[in-house]
Image: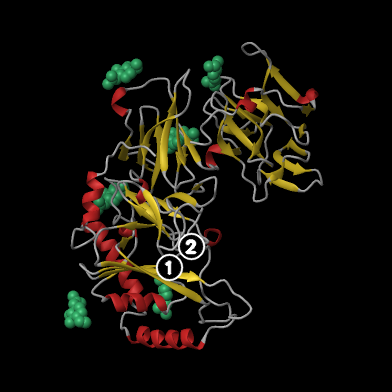
Amino acid sequence: MRRGKGDPAIAAVMGVLCVASAVLVVAGAKGGELTTQLLNGFTATHAAGAAAAFEPLLYATNGVFAFGFLRVGTASLDLAVVHLPSSFPLWRATPARLGDWSRPATLTFDSSLVLTDEDDDVLWRTLDTIGDVVVLLNSSNLVLRRYSKPVPAWQSFHNPSDTLVLDQNFTASSPPLISSNRRFAFRLGKTYMALHMEFNGGRTTPIYWQHTALEAQPQNATEPPVYGRLDGRGFFGLYLEGGGQKVDVLSFDTFVQNLTGVFRRMTLDDDGNLRAYYWTDGAKGWISDYRAIAERCELPASCGAYGLCVPGTAQCQCLDNTTTSTSPQCHAGETADLCATDGRQQLDFDVVRRKQVSVAYKEELPPETNRTAEECEAACAGNCSCWGAVYNGASGYCYLMDFPVETLVYEADDRKVGYFKVRKVPSPKRARMSPGVAAATAVLSLILAGLAAAGAYSGYRLWERRRRKRAGMEQELVPGPYKDLKTMGSSNSSF
Ligand SMILES: *[C@@H]1O[C@H](CO)[C@@H](O)[C@H](O)[C@H]1NC(C)=O
Ligand SMILES: *[C@@H]1O[C@H](CO)[C@@H](O)[C@H](O)[C@H]1NC(C)=O
Ligand SMILES: *[C@@H]1O[C@H](CO)[C@@H](O)[C@H](O)[C@H]1NC(C)=O
Ligand SMILES: *[C@@H]1O[C@H](CO)[C@@H](O)[C@H](O)[C@H]1NC(C)=O
Ligand SMILES: *[C@@H]1O[C@H](CO)[C@@H](O)[C@H](O)[C@H]1NC(C)=O
Ligand SMILES: *[C@@H]1O[C@H](CO)[C@@H](O)[C@H](O)[C@H]1NC(C)=O
């Protein structure tokens, strides 16, 4: 884990800070004077280009966590709650526009916390809050509250970034966890939790992993929604809101060991996997004891856009065979679709066809059944929001991808075929659609219109998907070699 490693720069915690000392409450805590609360009127300034990567402003009384200015990457500035022994940021403010580390920035507390840059532009603030004091709890929860009210006006536990910690409630109304590269999200539904890819600024969010609470009843409308919480005993529990009845437990590898006194976190990592980690005193790094997705090839983007992951060796190829995995990506990644702004027309694209491909997360894609390979391809070709179609000749299932093509999985079965669109980089010569492509598109549109499936089908697909989920039916009628590989793959290989 890149971020799990200790950053030596943070060890030198005394950054160059210009602090208005009059408003600080200093506690004579163990071995030094640590600021444990911020009062109204507090101001701290980040000095341009400070040497330390983290400048703490506020400590938890247990001395394990601190809140302050964090350098992100080489040159950006954010506010963060950091686990000091590991230098890991458990929470980040993550403003839409990050600050610039090489320029001054100011944090003030005056009823609300406000981060401003040197031009006094607000980068981040706690919205609609009135507080008397800001403290960092021993749990790492950053809390802003009034003296007269026990319930915080604002707390970082209700605004997670990519990480949950012990005893932090994660609810359907919480903002999702977003990986720090902002490509993946972890959300709760009423009775399930799911991992999503994030395209087009979060407007297209296909699911690639889902877990339904074992004892929740999705069909019971009066049952309250579930929420999740990381438990110190080594599991992630799902409970019903209100009563708190436990409806599922995802137990970690250390659950049986009854580890005591370890600090745990659950993080949506940049590769799209959701992992749990724990930290013991004197440890050199975080140890992972749970991951949602066991095999690298099942991650949705393990080989990048238009990549092909070969299970077993977890080796990467390119869908079009032309390039090798040595370059960072086979083709440029996409975020939007191929729909022209003026209407139904489709932007120019090239086609890549490939045998022996499949989608790792096809359980999450509603299939169209009883299709031929040609019908499957035509359904995608004529639809500007479709980027690819994967067809299983054994089952007749057709999976349409209405999101940009990321990594596919190799399967040694010639009946599994894929059709993928690659955006044509517009060049002055071929700015408009060539007559051939236009004609082909028109023909395909006709074919598509002819398919009785077109309109009402998506509603049916949704219904069918729910029905299958309820019935707990196996996804594919014909078990393929991929399922076998899944069970054969070593479940404790770490990547
Ligand atoms: C936080 O931890 C410190 C040191 O372990 C302890 O003295 C203090 O009482 C704790 N605070 C709370 C509110 O539990
Ligand atoms: C989490 O939810 C439980 C049950 O509703 C509640 O008792 C607990 O105080 C909550 N924890 C936090 C940190 O809000
Ligand atoms: C639906 O959920 C409510 C609340 O949990 C419960 O009281 C009720 O018995 C459930 N109904 C059915 C049909 O299971
Ligand atoms: C786990 O540890 C706690 C505290 O040390 C102890 O009270 C409990 O009995 C242990 N449970 C098991 C199953 O070993
Ligand atoms: C599948 O398609 C064929 C030919 O289009 C049709 O005869 C058959 O009834 C269809 N089967 C199902 C289950 O829809
Ligand atoms: C194109 O695909 C999208 C997403 O799958 C679907 O909602 C839409 O109905 C399709 N359009 C046509 C004309 O089939």
Of labels 2 and 1, the one closer to you: 1
Q: Is residue 13 above or below residue 149?
A: above
- Would you identify the image quadrant in which residue 256 lies? top left
Q: Position of residue 93 (x, y in %)?
A: 62, 42
Q: Foreground: 95 or 495?
A: 495
Could you say which disc has been placed on residue 137 in the image?
A: none
Q: Residue at the spot x=80%, y=27% of the render?
A: 20
Q: Amino acid at mark 1?
A: Asp
Q: Disc 2 or 1, which lies upstream in sequence?
A: 2
Establish whether ligand 6 lies closer than 8 Å to the Cβ of label 1: yes
Q: Which residue is mark 2?
A: 204
* Viewport quadrant of the C terminus: top left
Q: Residues within 10 Å of mark 2 (few under 14, many from 20)?
A: some
Q: Residue at the spot x=79%, y=23% of the render?
A: 21
Q: Is there any visible trace of residue 193 in the rendered image?
A: no
Q: Are marks 2 and 1 in contact (CB under 8 Å)?
A: yes
Q: Position of residue 131 (x, y in %)?
A: 67, 36
Which residue lies most toward the top here? Answer: 31
